[in-house]
Image (cartoon, coloured by chain):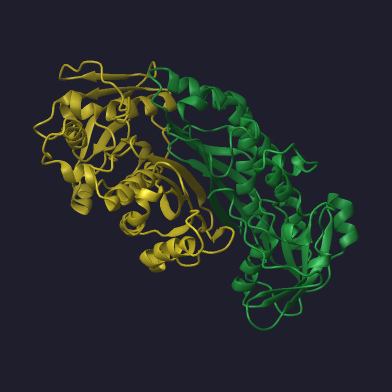
Chain colours: A yellow, B green
Amino acid sequence: MTIELALGPGAEFDAIRELLARWGDRAEGIGDDAAVLALPRGDALVASVDTAVEGRHFRRDWLTPREIAYRATTAALSDLAAMASHPRGILVALCVPAAWRSALGDLADGIGDAVDIARTRILGGNISGGTELSITTTVLGSTFTPLTRGGARPGDSVYVTGTLGGVGAELEALLAAAPPTRHRARFVHPMARIREAIWLSEHGATSAVDVSDGLAADARHVAAASGVGLSLDADLVPRFDDVTAEQALASGEEYELLVTARAPFDVAAFEARFDVPLTRIGDVVAGAATVEFRGARVATVRGYDHFSP
Amino acid sequence: MTIELALGPGAEFDAIRELLARWGDRAEGIGDDAAVLALPRGDALVASVDTAVEGRHFRRDWLTPREIAYRATTAALSDLAAMASHPRGILVALCVPAAWRSALGDLADGIGDAVDIARTRILGGNISGGTELSITTTVLGSTFTPLTRGGARPGDSVYVTGTLGGVGAELEALLAAAPPTRHRARFVHPMARIREAIWLSEHGATSAVDVSDGLAADARHVAAASGVGLSLDADLVPRFDDVTAEQALASGEEYELLVTARAPFDVAAFEARFDVPLTRIGDVVAGAATVEFRGARVATVRGYDHFSP
């Protein structure tokens, strides 16, 4: 754990003490130049990095510091889910402006919440000053059989977990300064579908991506990486009853999983185990690497690009 | 590789294309939710993260963008050297303000330079906007026998690589807006002592730390982690002839190695192989976990805290 807040003598150590006190045994062993971690024999390492920047990925008046840090950490962990990987630990790099210094403990708690839910731990980190808060999370996982975006083949079925559109609806309300919607919890407290992804991988998934840019955009990533077409039925995409199909397909930061499989999944077994819907929404087809929507008339669906200009 | 620059349609993909074009086969395989990496059988994973922030760790008018990115990446890689680890790859998270957008290719080249010298590669990354440039580098390495700060034992000898003080002297000149010193190259182009560290580990090193905060401060890290005293001779610490012992001991971002060993190293063999000085500067002693300097009268040596207020 490196710290450099330039807060004056003593204050830097107060900051690191505060973080470590909040994290407790979730961050045991921090303190050397780097973390050391044994991976299960035969597993490959899976690694990804994600940054959340104030005013760009979140606004301070929309969420508490604890919620902001939870969402940032969960967004990064969701990339491990997309690879069907077991989390082995995270590294946290924080840029903390002076105005955020008093929120440091709450930020630590939000990171701790996400780490607890993912049943992992904090391996190391870095704190520095800055003019805007940013949280950069590196997630490390491992798996014997990584699930990539590139494994979909013609004839596979396409599935999605969860119910879409709530996150986008709440974001729209926030942007309009309207009262919170009934979907606020979906926005504030997303879940990285880690255990779900491992189950799906063990039951024949051929490819996966997490829904971070919106299902339509993320489906295109799978099509491009696999070199196949995706023919999806917009009417089958599970959505809340107060959002349109277009809204459901464009809603980003859902952190649900879009998964392909050769043989059909045992949906009842999945839903009984995880209490999360699993829905077949279309087929992988031969031909150009594009995504077609049948069913409800769907206008061009724009990828999600946060709320920044 | 995730990208989100909010530069308008097309511009985001131009940015990622520019990065990948500069990196070439140093960044092959980027494009899934996470990178997948096989580690040598039996090795432990070693991981660390480091952030360099504009105006805090560097100033734009002191260095070219390529040099800034090289230094940031090398600083992170130096943590792998301190653990005597083989680099396996890095993840790069960039916050790029609009004013830096035209420098993106040069930043990519600086990262590429550091990766080439360390004989490693770029596994993934993230780009977002921001109001100040920041470069957060996660370094991943592996080793069968990690070298920590905690292995020094009474009776060990203490060594340091390189010649100290040049980086601090150049930094002082920059802060005073004075002409560059003869040490400019030490400041602009530090080296992560990766191969040196692996050699030292294979030849009996018991602990190591890289000199990032200044030798005096980093020696205290070893003393604390190992629960031993360090008795160092300030006159033996190799320094340039135009810096004082105090300056050499306080000079940070040197990225040399402070190493302890039970049996003496074959200094001639090390220096012949790496063309880098290796100097015995004192002893590990029993007692309180403190650092004592004998020899030249050394006033209290302050740890290095960059140039920020």
Which residue is rendered at x = 42% and y = 65% of the image? A20
Residue at 58%, 54% in the rendered image: B305
Vertical side of A289 occupied by B110: above or below: below
Q: Closer to the camera, A211 or B191? A: B191
Q: Is residue A308 left or right of residue B63?
A: left
Camera sees residue A281? yes
Left or right of A38? Residue A253 is: left
Q: Is residue B294 left or right of residue B11?
A: right
Q: A173 or B146: nearer the eye?
A: A173
Quarter placement of the C terminus of chain A: top left
Residue B2 picture location, percent across and down: 44, 33
Q: Quadrant of residue A258?
A: top left
Q: State the image coordinates of residue B144 (x, y, percent, origin top left).
A: 65, 60
Q: Is residue A111 visible?
A: no
Residue B224 at x, y percent in the picture: 60, 73
Q: Is residue A109 above or below residue A214?
A: below
Quadrant of the rendered image containing residue A75: top left
Which residue is depicted at the point 31% across and 50% down? A70
Q: Position of residue A153 (x, y in %)?
A: 39, 28
Q: Specify the quadrant of the image occupied by residue B289.
A: bottom right
Q: With respect to residue B186, does A107 lie above or below?
A: below
Number of callouts in the render?
0
- Of A226 and B127, the residue lying toward us: B127
